[in-house]
Amino acid sequence: MRDEIARAYHDEEWGRPVRDEARLLEKVCLEGFQSGLSWDTILRKRPAFRAAFAGFDAEVVARYGDRDVERLMGDAAIVRNRRKIEATIANARAVVEMRVAGDSLTELIWAHQPAPAGAPRSFAEVAASTPESAALARELKRRGFRFVGPTTVYALMQAVGVVNDHLAGCWVREDVERQRRAGV
């Protein structure tokens, strides 16, 4: 493992089921911020992202305006990319609009869970995207989300346990499977 932060993320978080809306919004947004960067960079900056985006509380972030964008562009603790900052605000607004319509980000993401598949034996067997991630990406875009292409969405699905791509020999895989079966 690269370092303690990456090890802890793999062992304690990656692939474990997430159903909390704020954590799902965080994952959607951080996967978008990661585009073109390393995940290690995002993990190291995650506490600053959480502070900058009010813990990814959709109601709060949805109210961010131009002054907030400029404030965030000056925040060296996060990735200062205007399009990604604006996408995070748009994503929060989309979550709020979903709620108003009686929909749920949690239900939408988990509705795209693929049929169970065997454990990959190597990273070469892990897909970059799937028909389910493409369908979820289309639906998220239709609802106003940004930075949600099929590959980014598949990374999200892996991160939040919609799929379990821990390799067959990984000691974490079975624990993740138990949590998924239990609906945790």
Image: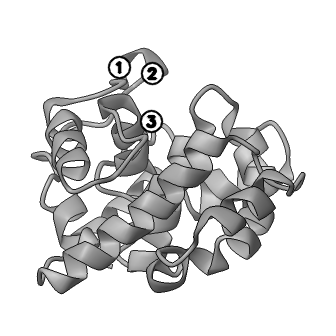
Mark 1 → mark 3, Cα distance in angstroms: 9 Å
Discs 1, 3 touching: Cβ within 8 Å: no
**x 32%, y 71%: residue:** 95
Q: Secondary structure at mark 3?
A: loop
Q: In which quadrant of the rendered view does residue 72 lie?
A: bottom right
Mark 2 → mark 3, Cα distance in angstroms: 6 Å
Please give left or right for residue 163 compared with residue 60 in the image: left
Residue 68 location, x and y as percent? 69, 68
- Of marks 2 and 3, which one's residue comes earlier in the chain? 2
Q: Quick check: 77 above or below 114?
A: below
**x 19%, y 84%: residue:** 100
Discs 2, 3 touching: Cβ within 8 Å: yes
Residue 162 location, x and y as percent? 29, 55
The residue where tag 2 is placed is: 122
Q: In which quadrant of the rendered view does residue 45 lie?
A: bottom right
Mark 2 → mark 1, Cα distance in angstroms: 6 Å
